Each structure stands twice: as structure tokens, then as C-alpha cells.
Image: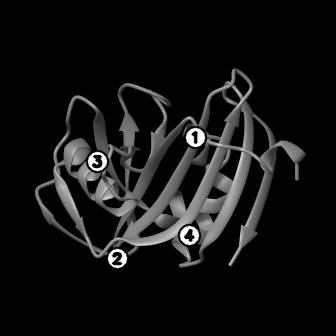
Amino acid sequence: MDPFWENWEPRERATLCFVRRENEVLLIRKKRGLGAGKINGPGGRIEPGETPAECAVRETSEEVGIVPEGVKERGQLHFQFADGYSLHCTVFVAHAFSGELAETDEALPLWTPVDSIPYGEMWADDAHWLPGVMEGRSFRAWFHFDGDSMLSKHILWD
């Protein structure tokens, strides 16, 4: 693993939340912000005083109108970008939700069969950890990016 990870500190902290429904997972096509145009899970930046789990629930509700229930932490993502931006992201999964799914200014919701996740339209790192998360596994991962290009990866599975 690259030595700069030893003393690494993120500029921002965020979450992703993958809501499951039988053999499907809720993904979004992001309309703005980091990764606009890409497909990902709902999520966003953690606000002051907010826990990662609270953020995952709030961001999912704001982006697609549903409230995930019983969120469980499944991973820790560490991103370093060549331009100096750094992000720590906690990944959650939920198997229940309440409310009505809706498109918002931020996201178009997409129920997607787990065996048809469109990795080609997602960040390059997702194909390396999301399949394991969909199987119920937990992980920690470190990724170095230059724009959309992944320069290095290191993944540890629990």
C-alpha cells in the first residue's frame, strides 16, 4: 500500500447507503456534485454533529424520498485524488425502508437487479468492493484517483 496512507487525513467525510429489496438494490443517477452523471448509491457529506449512520439516512431521504431503516455499516472507503482532494466514506446497507421513492433535483432513483449493476457507469472503484457488499461482506479500502482514473487500490475484507 502507498506509504502516504499512514498519516492520511480526509478533507471531507461522507456516506453511501445501498437499500436492498429482494434481489434488487437502489442506485441513483447523480445529477450534481462530485460524480454528477454517474450511477452510485444515495449519500453525501456528513454534517457537523451528525453520525455517519444519521447522515446515510438523511441523505437517502433527501435524494430519493425514502427513509432507510436498520442501516448497517459495511465498509470504509478512503479516497485520495491527485488534485489534493481527499474523502473518507462510510458504506451502509439497509434491508427496509419507509416512504415513497421519488426523483429529486439531486438524483434519479433506479431499482437495479443485483446481478445487473452497471459498473461501467459508476466510479472505477465500485466494481472492486460493491459485489462483496451485496454478498453481505464488510471491508476497508484505499483508492488513489486522478480525475476519473483509478491509479491504485488496496482492499481488506473482514
What amino acid type is highlighted by mark number 4?
Val
The quarter of the picture where residue 80 lies is top right
**Residue 103: percent from left, percent from top:** 20, 39
Query: Earlier along the polypeptide chain: callout 3 or callout 4?
Result: 3
Q: Quadrant of the C terminus?
A: bottom right
Foreground residue, 26 or 152? 152
Q: What's the CA distance linking mark 1 and mark 4?
A: 20 Å
| Residue type pointed to by label 1 | Leu
Compare marks 1 and 4 and give the one earlier in the sequence.
1
Q: Nearer the viewer, mark 1 or mark 3?
A: 1
Label 3: state its secondary structure.
helix
- In the image, 79: left or right of 122? right
Which numbered disc covers residue 87? 1
Residue for badge 3: 59
Choose the circle earlier in sequence order: 1 or 3.
Answer: 3
The dot on residue 75 is none
- Which SS class for mark 2? loop
Residue 60 in picture, x, y percent from top left: 28, 51
Cα distance in 3D space between marks 3 and 4? 20 Å
Instruction: Confirm or deny contact between disc 3 and disc 4 (CB under 8 A).
Output: no
Question: Which comes before the other along the chain, label 1 or label 2?
Answer: 2
> Which one is earlier in the sequence, the residue at label 3 or at label 2?
2
Q: Residues within 10 Å of mark 4 (few under 14, many from 20)?
A: some
For this view, does 119 lie left or right of residue 94? right
Q: Is residue 118 visible?
A: no
The crowding category of the residue bearing disc 3, from other C-alpha atoms within 10 Å (few below 14, some 14 to 19, many at least 20), is many
Earlier along the polypeptide chain: callout 2 or callout 4? Answer: 2
Alpha carbon separation for disc pair 1 and 3:
16 Å
> Does residue 128 sit above or below 87 in this rendering?
below
Return the residue found at the far top: 83
Q: Which mark is residue 133?
A: 4
Label ID, residue 22: 2
